[in-house]
Image: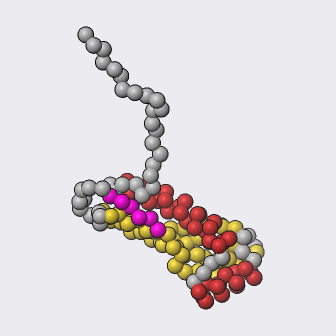
Amino acid sequence: MAIIGVNITKIDAERKDPQGGKISINNNISITNVEEKDLSLGSAKQKGLKFIFLFKCDYVPDVGRINLEGNVMFLAPAEKVKDVLESWKKNKNVPAEMMEPILNAALNKCNIEAIKLSQDINLPTPVPMPRLQRSGATAPKKKAK
């Protein structure tokens, strides 16, 4: 079982009038559908799964939003493909051992794209950026005359 690709198929980003004050950002990702996909790898054809996802960044107060839709292509044995599809059709559930790498792959792709989009439309980045801080440094003292 392996992830063979992550694709973004729809991008929606909007900036509204700034309202001032503190802004909080709510990020969420969810699987919206699972489909069977025939994959051609060289001359061999194999069954795979296409996990369709929705990534949302909502800014509170309502100063903007970033929504990304896409899919994760997953290669698995035919028996596993069948089991996952049956589970999805019954109760919209994906086995945890598959869900973790699928969501992590989608998050990696979406977080990078969301950072680029937030800069393009002047919204705060949806993922905190690392900052350097001087350790143990203090402000210079003024000498008394």
The residue positioned 38% from the left and 66% from the top of the image is 58
The residue positioned 65% from the left and 73% from the top of the image is 96
- Any part of residue 121 in sight: no
Residue lying farthest to the bottom in this orientation: 90
Residue 68 occupies which quadrant of the picture? bottom left
Residue 107 image offset from top left, x and y in percent: 53, 63
Position of the C terminus by quadrant: top left
Q: Is residue 53 above or below residue 121?
A: below
Q: Is residue 135 left or right of residue 74?
A: left
Q: Is residue 15 left or right of residue 1?
A: left
Q: Nearer the viewer, residue 90 or 37?
A: 90
Q: Is residue 142 left or right of residue 56?
A: left
Q: Is residue 80 above or below residue 4?
A: below
Which stretch did the figure color magenta? 23-28
Tell me the chief SS of the magenta region. strand
The residue positioned 47% from the left and 68% from the top of the image is 28
